[in-house]
Amino acid sequence: MFAKSSYRPAIAIAVAAAGASIIALTGCGSGSGAQAASGSTSTAAASPAASAASGSTAGSAASSPADGTAAGSAPASHTAASRTPECNGGQLRVSYTDNAQIRNGALDGMSKTDNVVTFTNVGRSTCVIQGYPGVAALNGQGVQVAQAVRGGGAIHPVFLRPGATASSMVGANTASCASPVAVPGLLVTAPDQYTSVRLGAAGDMCLRSLTVNPVVPGDAAGLPL
């Protein structure tokens, strides 16, 4: 999937998983956001690829964790990050944002559909998360039909105290194809993790332009409202 950065000596952080159903997020708990599918469960996720992996099934075993570092990025020199354990699936709750303005389309445009996926530390200690989550679009049968490619944005370690949240924007340009399709679910995998979480409907999208941005602090994917 993504190349590992030499940045994190004691931790590995990234957010991109390929072999899982639509948006696969790292974490053991089902998404609790407004769009999260009811009864969604954590599944083992294969590392996401840059292009769609049609025909792969949700919950396939992961061959490698999602790597959150951008290709060719300079190693970070964050001493604190090297001493802080990375966020693991057991302490991350993955869901769509519960921000009412975003849920009502504040980040959508005339030709794009945006979703914000959040990672909340439900553990008892501070952890660090960094890079790109793995995200895959699922069809009605739970089969992956597209993998999100990396979008823009700077990559920085995000330190999550208990109860704190980081987020990542997932978007698609609905003007990039003649017939956008309804995406019934996303499989999301947190950076450097193998476990994925299935979230609910993501709206109408052109799958060829499905992208995911690096995680940033807070619940709005770093975008002003």
Image (spheres, rainbow, N blue to C red):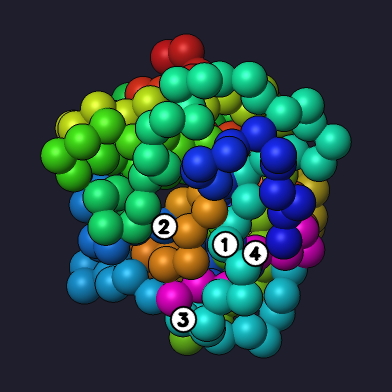
Highlighted range, magenta? 44-51
Residue pointed to by mark 4:
48
Q: Residues within 10 Å of mark 3 (few under 14, many from 20)?
A: many
Name above or below for residue 1 compared with residue 154. below
Count of numbered labels shown in the rendering: 4
Nearest to the observer: residue 162 or residue 154? 162
Residue 65 shown in magenta: no
The disc, 3 or 2, on the residue closer to the chain's N-terminal end is 2
The residue positioned 47% from the left and 13% from the top of the image is 224
Residue, disc 2:
26
Farthest residue in the left direction?
124
Q: Main secondary structure of the magenta part?
A: loop
Residue type indicated by callout 2: Thr
User: Dot 2: few (<14), some (14–19), or many (≥20) neighbours within 10 Å?
Assistant: many
* Residue type at the position of mark 1: Pro
- Whichever of callouts 3 and 4 sits on the residue coming sooner in the sequence is 4
Sequence-wise, the earlier of marks 1 and 2 is: 2
Measure the C-alpha gap from mark 1 to mark 2: 9 Å
Amino acid type at circle 4 is Pro
Instruction: Measuring from the top left, give residue 168's x and y in whole percent.
Output: 49, 37
Residue 65 is tagged as 1
